[in-house]
Amino acid sequence: MSPVRVAVVDDQHLFASGMRMLVEAQDDMSCVGTAADGLAALELCAAEEPDVLLLDLRMPVLNGIETTARLAARGGDRPRVVVLTTIRRDEAVLAALRAGAAAFLTKDALPEVVLATIRDVHEGRPAPTEAEALDLLRADGTLVETPRPDEVLDVLTAREREVFLLVAKGLSNQEIASTVFLSEATVKTHVRAVLTKLGLRNRIQVVITAHERGLVRA
């Protein structure tokens, strides 16, 4: 299996260098480059096509939220963005997740948490901070006003709706497979179909969509 290609974007050069060293020390990862601002990050992603991008939220020139949004606008599911923040309960974190980030990390996260997040995001699994993202949604409490909240699910089959709601509750593919008596491979296929049909980039956007429409309880 090819190493996970990781890029690091942070205007604190010492921090970026430390993250690069951590990534390079892993047998299953490689760091394909670093950058110090959002515009440089976009150029780096275009040139190197990383699988996972560790992206600081607060940077000069172009911040992490706008950078994430521009990457999402390019289409595709790569790179999968993990935003970096100094404050866990930060409105900017939720804004970045809405813009397309797959997960977030605080800058004081333990190395094993950083590495687990990279691997989970790369494989499309729930990241370690997904529960904290749910807490942010609870605190925010923003609901989309629409006559029929579940209309977003009209394009899904009955099974895909079921999988959508289970993903929205934070279940892993393995847990979903056990719940609906399907193979994990089949669940992965349904999750991919849900993301494609709803125009979502990742699992956390399923969570956000469901909670903001009141389809599941936070």
Image: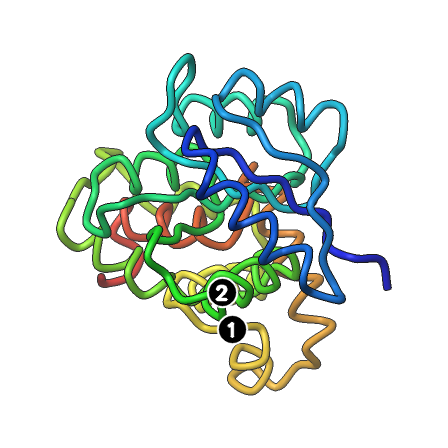
Q: Hey, which residue is sitting farthest top in the picture?
A: 61
Label 2: few (<14), some (14–19) or many (≥20) C-alpha neighbours in 10 Å:
many
From the viewer's perspective, tell me whether residue 81 is left or right of residue 213: right
Q: Can you give x and y, in whole percent of width and height, for residue 191 in the image?
A: 61, 59
Q: Nearer the viewer, residue 3 or 148?
A: 3
From the viewer's perspective, tell me whether residue 76 is left or right of residue 102: right
Q: Say if mark 2 contacts mark 1, CB within 8 Å.
A: yes
Q: How is the image coloured?
A: rainbow
SS assignment at label 1: loop
Q: Can you give x and y, in whole percent of width and height, for residue 95 in the image?
A: 31, 34
Q: Quadrant of residue 32?
A: top right
Amino acid type, residue under disc 2 in the picture: Pro
- For the residues labelled 2 and 1, the Cα–Cα distance comes to 6 Å
Report the residue at 50% width, 54% height from top. 203
Q: Quadrant of residue 28?
A: bottom right
Report the residue at 60% width, 80% height from top. 177
116 shown above or below 63: below
92 shown above or below 41: below
49 shown above or below 37: below
Report the residue at 42% width, 21% height from top. 66
SS assignment at label 2: loop
**Label number found at residue 172:** 1
Q: Quadrant of the C terminus?
A: bottom left
